[in-house]
Image: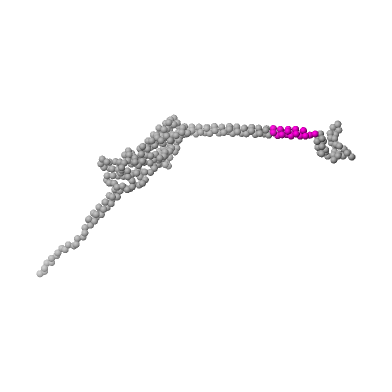
Amino acid sequence: MTTPSTSFFVPSPSRPSRVPVMLAAVVLAASVASVSSSIRHIEPTQIGMKISRLGSARGVARADVVSGYTLINPLATEVVTYPGTQVSYTWTKTATEESPTDESLNFNTADSVQMNVDVNFAFQIDRTRAPDIYRRFGPDVRYITQTYMRNVIRDQMTRVGSRFTSDEILGPKRAAFVDQVEQGIRGRLNPDGFTIQNFSVNQITPPDNIRQAINAKIEAAQTAIQAQNKVAQSRAEAEQEVAKARGDAQAILVRAQAQALANRVLAQSLTPQLVQSKVVEKWDGHQPQVVSDGGSLIQIPVTGEGKAAK
């Protein structure tokens, strides 16, 4: 008779559970991610602002302007930045500047001529006014520039342009026109927190008919100047001829006076004896072939065999 075998279940040693370790890793990763998302770094070239999203304190206050590393609650706060350095824009008709489209400005002059201008300007945001700018205009600086600031500049050019004629703006008063526009822009934008650092009008283009009239006027003026120059040249040449003739006449007169004086001195110095002596010195020993009825014009002393005395 066989004895039935009895089997016993012996439990194996239990392994340590991995759940706490994984949970700890998840918590640590979440903490790191939370801390990372809670830290913002504001560059020195930026103006940072902490914007509250919740509660009655929604928005931004002057005390919320930050820089460097700053800690935020990403669920309740966000950081918005403005450029802290100079910002430059150019509005031009050509497609090689800020935009491929025509961004030039137009305004009318006092004589109702429409001018087209290319404008360049630069500004910097006042750090202390950044919250005000955000509350009023929002976070996009380019949008602010292309809307509000562009409208201010165009309006100021229209106001000032109505005080000048087209001839003045294109001629001697261009600098005064640009200066008055710049002063007006500074007076309107600086109080808003935009410090204008440079403003210039690179080109002023009138309508074609005005440009043609200006070119014709310039050409006529140049022709008149050339004619005046020719008259002046002819007058100068004539004056030179007169001066030369006077000089020649004076020279002739001086020479004649000198000759007359010499003749008088010579005449006074001539005596019959001197003349006779000169004749004898020049005589070659022969009687003249032609003489007058009165005989020889020259009396030669004769000695010995009829030869002249030497």
Residue at 25% x, 54% y: name it.
25
Q: Vertically, is 209 above or below 70?
A: above
* Magenta stretch, main secondary structure class: helix
Does the stretch in magenta take in 23? no
Chain part drawn in magenta: 252-271
The residue sitting at the top extreme is 111
The picture quadrant where one finds residue 87 is top left
Residue at 44% x, 31% y: name it.
164
Q: Is residue 80 left or right of residue 295?
A: left
Does the stretch in magenta take in 258? yes
Q: Is residue 212 left or right of residue 267?
A: left
* Frontmost residue, 240 versus 276: 276
* Residue 118 spot, x, y in % from top left: 43, 38
* Residue 244 spot, x, y in % from top left: 65, 34
Q: Vertically, is 127 above or below 164?
A: below
- Number of residue marks: 0
The picture quadrant where one finds residue 146 is top left
